[in-house]
């Protein structure tokens, strides 16, 4: 369970604890064999040591924590099974300072920019050789909409998160940043490799297009390390066992949790998932929204509104399915989800939540009133509307109401675009 505190404004979450409680345990038969009389042993490794690290998916985010051996009772005789447990690297949630401090923001703003939202005009000081001049820049409509939206939710964000943060400080989950730590602490540089998921997706696009025939689901079997990239593309891969499986793709190792499945494909190739003929009670979507930062960094490709609309949510959703979409603070995207996307999927909006990102000491990662980056992101929650012609599944099944205007407060992962867990909240 990731919930540390639950109050009327929302929840204070521990993302790291949620990941580690998934219990990533890898079982491997150990050779050579040992005697049956040899006692079970446990060996502990320092998770910070480089020699105990393995590159797993998103850039060595997991580290081997301990290894335990136990007898294998099958036909292998005296062989033992090595159980290796993996935990997420805690350093990736070590956000001790804001990305931009409020003091720096306040000091820089008068010199560079003065704004009056009522007038829709901002003054910028431009320094040239030998003189200083001022120029007026009119806010565009997107900026005006963003300021109006921020004004509406500012009190909710400030008051609600403050209440949750105070509770976290009282319980010891959050720790005030001491002056000594503030001066002496240095960010820890992790030996992180570049994740190859984008390269895998690029490879999938260049493969010959598949007919919309029903491909068999690929079951990950015990000790099956022969799975290749081509085996996984555009087909559903399942781990139905009760233990973690490890696969290697493009030289990187990935952990597949117990009782889980995934589809690695381009968004235009969704028929393998549809062919499974399964529907889902909760669907969470985190689209790659178009923005200036994505264009500059060229980190990943973004989807157009039309492409997002084509995601076959109505075919994947069970009756009364809860659909949750992560949305950036750009008003254009928020209006698209509310006014176009959800109506096209027959999804009715039931709530709007906000994820507030804080440091380990309870400060906002960005100043709340920063004109550039905000310390919060939005989630739009909706339910698939029941068709009148379809009978109810079960009259005893009651759909619980979703509360509106709730806050999710947590320390963000330093890896790009990792969202907090929603399990236990909806």
Image (cartoon, rainbow, N blue to C red):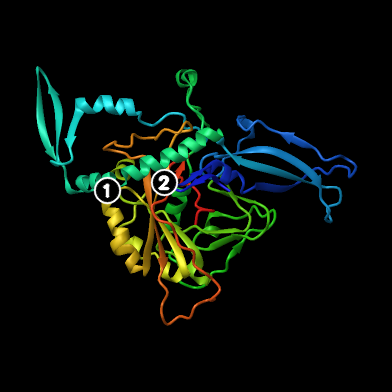
* Residue 149: mark: 1
Q: Position of residue 389 (x, y in %)?
A: 42, 82
The correct choice, above or below, for 202 with respect to 66 in the image is below
The correct choice, above or below, for 10 with respect to 222 in the image is above
Q: Position of residue 219 (x, y in %)?
A: 62, 62
Q: Nearer the viewer, residue 279 or 58?
A: 279
Using the numbered discs, state the Cα–Cα distance from disc 2 to disc 1 in whole angstroms.
15 Å
Q: Is residue 2 left or right of residue 271?
A: right
Q: Position of residue 29 (x, y in %)?
A: 75, 48
The residue depicted at 49 percent of the width and 78 percent of the height is 392
- Number of other residues with Cα within 10 Å of mark 2, as a class: few under 14, some 14 to 19, many 20 or more: many
At numbered mark 2, what does the secondary structure look like: helix, strand or loop?
A: strand
The correct choice, above or below, for 7 with respect to 235 in the image is above
The residue depicted at 11 percent of the width and 19 percent of the height is 129
The residue depicted at 19 percent of the width and 31 percent of the height is 113
First in sequence: mark 2 vs mark 1: 1
Taking the view exactly as shown, the residue that stands out farthest to the right is 37
**Which residue matches tag 2?**
355
């Amino acid at each position: 369970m990731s919930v540390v505190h639950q109050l009327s404004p929302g929840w204070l979450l521990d993302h790291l604890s949620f990941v580690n409680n998934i219990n990533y345990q890898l079982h491997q038969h150990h050779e050579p064999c040992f005697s049956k009389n040899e006692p079970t042993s446990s060996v502990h490794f320092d998770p910070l040591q480089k020699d105990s690290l393995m590159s797993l998916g998103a850039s060595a985010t997991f580290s081997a924590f301990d290894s335990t051996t136990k007898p294998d009772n099958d036909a292998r005789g005296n062989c033992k099974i090595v159980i290796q447990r993996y935990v997420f690297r805690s350093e990736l949630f070590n956000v001790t300072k804001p990305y931009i401090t409020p003091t720096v923001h306040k000091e820089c703003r008068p010199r560079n920019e003065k704004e009056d939202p009522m007038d829709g005009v901002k003054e910028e000081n431009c320094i040239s050789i030998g003189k200083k001049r001022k120029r007026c820049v009119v806010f565009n409509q997107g900026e005006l909409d963003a300021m109006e939206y921020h004004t509406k939710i500012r009190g909710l964000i400030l008051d609600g998160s403050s209440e949750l943060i105070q509770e976290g400080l009282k319980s010891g989950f959050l720790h005030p940043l001491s002056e000594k730590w503030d001066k002496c602490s240095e960010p820890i540089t992790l030996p992180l490799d570049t994740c190859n998921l984008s390269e895998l997706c690029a490879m999938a696009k260049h493969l010959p297009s598949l007919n919309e025939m029903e491909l068999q689901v690929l079951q990950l079997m015990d000790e099956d390390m022969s799975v290749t990239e081509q085996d996984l593309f555009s087909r559903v891969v399942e781990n139905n066992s009760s233990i973690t499986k490890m696969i290697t793709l493009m030289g990187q190792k990935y952990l597949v949790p117990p009782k889980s499945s995934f589809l690695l494909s381009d968004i235009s190739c969704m028929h393998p998932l549809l062919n499974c003929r399964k529907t889902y009670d909760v669907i969470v979507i985190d689209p790659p929204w178009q923005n200036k930062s994505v264009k500059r960094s060229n980190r990943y490709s973004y989807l157009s509104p039309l492409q997002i609309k084509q995601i076959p949510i109505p075919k994947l959703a069970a009756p009364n399915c809860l659909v949750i979409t992560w949305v950036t603070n750009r008003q254009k995207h928020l209006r698209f989800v509310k006014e176009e996307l959800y109506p096209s999927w027959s999804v009715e909006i039931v709530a709007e939540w906000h994820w507030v990102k804080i440091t380990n000491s309870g400060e906002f990662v960005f100043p709340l009133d920063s004109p550039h980056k905000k310390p919060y992101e939005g989630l739009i929650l909706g339910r698939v509307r029941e068709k009148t012609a379809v009978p109810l599944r079960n009259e005893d099944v009651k759909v619980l109401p979703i509360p509106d205007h709730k806050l999710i407060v947590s320390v963000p992962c330093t890896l790009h675009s990792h969202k907090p867990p929603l399990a236990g909240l909806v």
